[in-house]
Image (cartoon, rainbow, N blue to C red):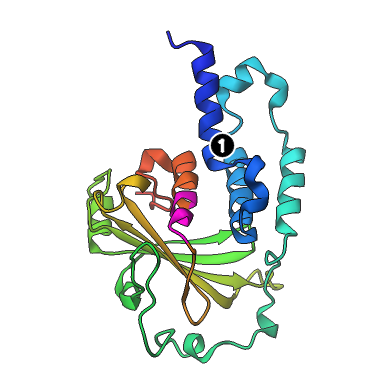
């Protein structure tokens, strides 16, 4: 039987690799917000606190009211306010449905280049995310769609997903929620050898109408996979797999 001291040491090391408060001041504010929402999502989906920890410390359970306080705090951080579509002047690159940029091809520090070919892919899901009040459409390429249909998990190399994110306004009187300003495009690319350190998935994010690559170092991909590992490891680290 594994000694308790080993489990404690393992959990502490794992936790610090994801969320080290001792180095909090060194983390860029944008990444801090990502980590805080990772915390919210982990608690909400009952992934944290760990069940084995709660078995020994039942009083450590987080109540719905405590989770609500955490959500309220994170949702008031700079850049998290909901978008009022009526006040938005859309970028011409977005409003006419054309390619977001006219020249050049943005490339993420992870080596993934932006491409708008996803516009012809199959839509996997449409989500309305609480943090930041964003609307998202998730696309999958042909390899991804075939793997989902055949229940082929882990997903094969070449599988790709793209998430397109818009801000949103609050619901109107009829309950309609309209897309607001374009925020970013996020890519997940499966290449088990190239991206071995992040469970075989490469990550890229392109912000704003000019599609500025996100992340100054490849460390941002570690933040991405940490959240996926915590919440959806059983799905080969993929969110938004449609229900059959």
Give neighbour class at mark 1: few <14, some 14-19, many 20+ (Cα, 10 Å): few
**Position in image of residue 6 (x %, y %):** 49, 17
**Position in image of residue 235 (x %, y %):** 37, 43
Is 6 on the left-hand or right-hand side of 58?
A: left
Q: Is residue 152 visible?
A: yes
Q: Nearer the viewer, residue 126 or 236?
A: 236
Is 15 on the left-hand or right-hand side of 108?
A: right
Q: Nearer the viewer, residue 116 or 136?
A: 116
Q: Residue furthest top?
A: 1
What residue sits 31% from the left and 70% below the top?
121
The answer to whether residue 219 is magenta is: yes
The answer to whether residue 2 is magenta is: no
What residue sits 39% from the left and 85% below the top?
99
What residue sits 57% from the left and 27% below the top?
50
The kind of secondary structure the magenta stretch mainly shows is: helix
Residue 211 vertical placement versus 8 (above, below): below
- Tag 1, which secondary structure? helix
Is 54 on the left-hand or right-hand side of 72?
A: left
Residue 4 vertical placement versus 128 (above, below): above
Q: Nearer the viewer, residue 42 or 217?
A: 217
**Position in image of residue 200 (x %, y %):** 30, 48
Q: Is residue 199 visible?
A: no
Q: Which residues are magenta?
A: 217-223
Picture quadrant of residue 187:
bottom left
Q: Nearer the viewer, residue 222 or 52?
A: 222
Is 227 on the left-hand or right-hand side of 193?
A: right
**Position in image of residue 96 (x %, y %):** 46, 90
Task: Please state, as top left, top right, bottom left or bottom right, where the N terminus lies in the image.
Answer: top left
Residue 160 vertical placement versus 44 (above, below): below
- Residue annotated with mark 1: 16
């Amino acid at each position: 039987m594994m000694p308790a001291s080993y489990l404690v040491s393992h959990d502490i090391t794992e936790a610090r690799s994801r969320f080290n408060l001792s180095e909090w001041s060194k983390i860029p504010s944008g990444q801090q917000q990502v980590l805080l929402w990772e915390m919210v999502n982990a608690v909400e989906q009952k992934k944290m606190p760990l069940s084995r920890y709660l078995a020994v410390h039942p009083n450590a359970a987080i109540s719905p009211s405590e989770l609500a306080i955490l959500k309220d705090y994170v949702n008031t951080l700079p850049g998290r306010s909901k978008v009022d579509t009526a006040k938005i002047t859309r970028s011409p690159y977005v409003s006419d449905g054309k390619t977001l940029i006219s020249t050049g091809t943005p490339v993420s520090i992870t080596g993934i280049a932006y491409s708008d070919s996803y516009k012809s892919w199959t839509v996997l899901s449409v989500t309305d995310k609480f943090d930041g009040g964003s609307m998202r459409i998730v696309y999958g390429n042909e390899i991804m769609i075939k793997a989902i249909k055949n229940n082929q998990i882990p997903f094969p190399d070449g599988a790709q997903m793209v998430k397109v994110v818009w801000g949103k306004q609050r619901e109107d009187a009829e309950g309609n929620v309209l897309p607001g300003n374009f925020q970013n495009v996020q890519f997940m690319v499966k290449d088990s050898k190239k991206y071995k350190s992040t469970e075989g998935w490469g990550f890229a994010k392109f912000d704003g109408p000019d599609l500025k690559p996100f992340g100054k170092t490849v460390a941002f991909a570690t933040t991405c996979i940490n959240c996926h590992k915590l919440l959806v490891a059983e799905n080969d680290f993929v969110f938004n797999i449609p229900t059959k």
